[in-house]
Image (cartoon, rainbow, N blue to C red):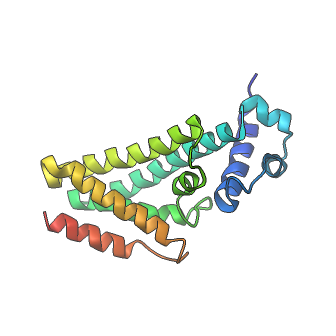
Amino acid sequence: MGIRARTEQKLLDAADELLFSRGIVATPIDAITERAGVSAATLYRGYASKEALLAAALERRQRAWVETWDRAVERADSAAGRLLAVFDALDDFRERADGARWCAFLGTAAEYADPPAEVAAAVQADTDGFRDRLTAFARPLAGDEAARLADDILLLVTGELAMRLRDAHRRSDAARRIARALIDGR
């Protein structure tokens, strides 16, 4: 027996808000159910564990991220612009009501030395999605070196997200400038 879509939405909203702002370990399941206005029994009808709820929240966040990134790519007018659109998307995503001071996936990876399988899979899916999309956008610019350029850009994206812990109002200008230099240097 599952849970209603509206109840699931409330649980995922509460999990997203609390887990990605307070931290996973620091947030008890009771805080999530209280914020969502549901009982623990209701939560466990939909999710086998806190980690299953976390994985679902990460998967939902990843879909929202890709939608934001797609919109940034649509605004680009060149191959280089489509590759660099990831930085516009980072800034756009942070402005969302559910944006965070940094990356929920990096935060999750930092909290678990040995993550449960469903959490590890969600984090890996995000990493693979980043790498695959960046490689596809890099291919017209770098040909056989697209995967290498994509990894370079992914490192810049990850660093940019980590720097947001130091400066909550930071924009992606420096990372974009470095990425542009990488593209131009090819």
Query: Foreground: 157 or 69?
Result: 157
- Tell me where residue 158 appears, x and y as whole percent: 42, 61
Residue 21, compared with residue 43, is above or below; it is: below
- Tell me where residue 176 appears, x and y as whole percent: 32, 70
| Quadrant position of the C terminus in the picture | bottom left
- Tell me where residue 95 appears, x and y as whole percent: 54, 66
The answer to whether residue 75 is visible is no
The answer to whether residue 107 is visible is yes
Question: Which residue is located at x 78 percent, y 46 percent?
Answer: 29
In the displayed orientation, state which residue is furthest to the top.
Answer: 1
Image position of 184 (left or right of 171):
left
Query: Foreground: 134 or 79?
Result: 134
Image position of 143 (left or right of 106):
left
Image position of 71 (left or right of 14):
left
Image position of 21 (left or right of 148):
right
Question: Which residue is located at x 70 percent, y 61 percent?
Answer: 22
Question: What is the count of numbered marks?
Answer: 0
In the displayed orientation, state which residue is furthest to the front.
Answer: 113
Residue 136, compared with residue 93, is above or below; it is: above
- Tell me where residue 41 appears, x and y as whole percent: 84, 33
Residue 88, compared with residue 144, is above or below; it is: below
Question: Which residue is located at x 73 percent, y 31 percent?
Answer: 46
| Quadrant position of the N terminus in the picture | top right
Rendered image quadrant of residue 21: bottom right
Query: Foreground: 75 or 150?
Result: 150
